Image (tube, grey):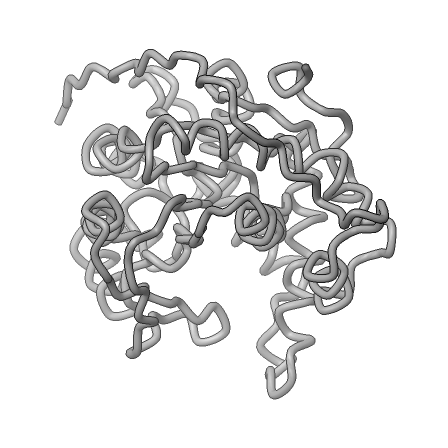
Amino acid sequence: MRVECKLLETGRTAPPPFPFDAPSHSNNGMTSEPIERLVNAEGLPTHYSQIVRHFWAPLANDIARRAQQEKPLIVGINGAQGSGKTTLCQFMEILLAERGLRAITLALDDLYLTRSERDRLATEVHPLFATRGVPGTHAPGLGMAIIDAVRKGVSFDMPRFDKIRDDREPERRRIDGPVDVLLFEGWCVGAHPQADEELLEPANPLESEEDPEGIWRSVANLWLRGEYRTLFNRLDMLVMLKVDDFAAVLANRRRQEERLYAAPGADRTRMMDDAALLRFCRHYERLTLHMLEDLPRRADHLFAIDRAQAPVALPASLKA
């Protein structure tokens, strides 16, 4: 089945001057206490506060300027697995609070379908949909309902997904409105679909061996053209954390797995070994490589991320 769907390009205008650019440090030049506490709580290197000051603070300034023009503001944060999206959003919430704005983070991961829903999808459509990740394994409608609630300034319930259990948590977190900035982070947030001809050849052994007819990747692409496009079109701006290549994704995902199972009470016998991790990441490879080529020209701000998961340079879009 072929679906024709023209992607809408959103014209963006420069925001008006913001009345103040709040620093990410106190009057004595030191980093603010909330920033220092988060650096320590996350076990980040001590120099990470300098990364916050030199890279994330300018981004917060731009978001704050735009929020003066349009509030609430929906900010998409795109980045491959382990690129630092969650960490960025944690600091961004603090930085925006210092600028008088209430920011809340919505993770695309928390929109995953339940395990039973994915199992049914695997039975009825294709077995590879049992594994969370690609378009089709989320509930875009749930994300749109949250964005609608933020736009209206009303309270809403935030879903949560447990990656160790590989299932959605039964209880949700209540968020009271209004919210000034919604940070919507996820590995494929803002992604555009591939052309039909790009789907013909398998991207890796997983696709050649388990999706030889291209059904799984074609259906995922159809979802990206449909409900996901509708969801991503609601973004007011897009930030991309761009890693070098897929090898960087594998290395970052290994670190992420180690951190995940280092948590108290985690059963390390369930942690993926290298072979299982490679198979898991191959579900993401096709779209990841496509986004590394396609999204840099679409993002409002593009941060190159090095192998240490740190930004390389301040984007030209944020330089005075």
Q: Is residue 168 above or below residue 118?
A: below
Q: Position of residue 118 (x, y in %)?
A: 27, 61
Left or right, residue 85 beside residue 69: right
In front here: 205 or 239?
A: 239
Residue 207 spot, x, y in % from top left? 43, 39
Pick the residue in front: 278 or 149: 149
Task: Tell me: residue 1, above or below residue 82.
Answer: above
Q: In which quarter of the image is residue 55?
A: top right
Identify the image quadrant of residue 311.
Answer: top right
The location of residue 281, given as percent across then percent down, is: 55, 48
Percent across and percent down for residue 171 are: 30, 78
Up/down of 243 relative to 266, above or below: above
Residue 289 showing in the rendered view: no
In the image, 256: left or right of 93?
Answer: right
Which quarter of the rendering shows the N terminus?
Answer: top left
Q: In which quarter of the image is the C terminus?
A: top right
Count the numbered circles shown.
Answer: 0
* Residue 82 in sight here: yes
Name the residue at 72% across, 69% down: 41
Q: Which of 95 and 129 is in front in this view?
A: 95
Of residue 296 and residue 56, the one placed in the foreground of this image is: 56
Image point (68%, 17%), residue name? 319
Residue at 49%, 38% (x, y): give it: 77
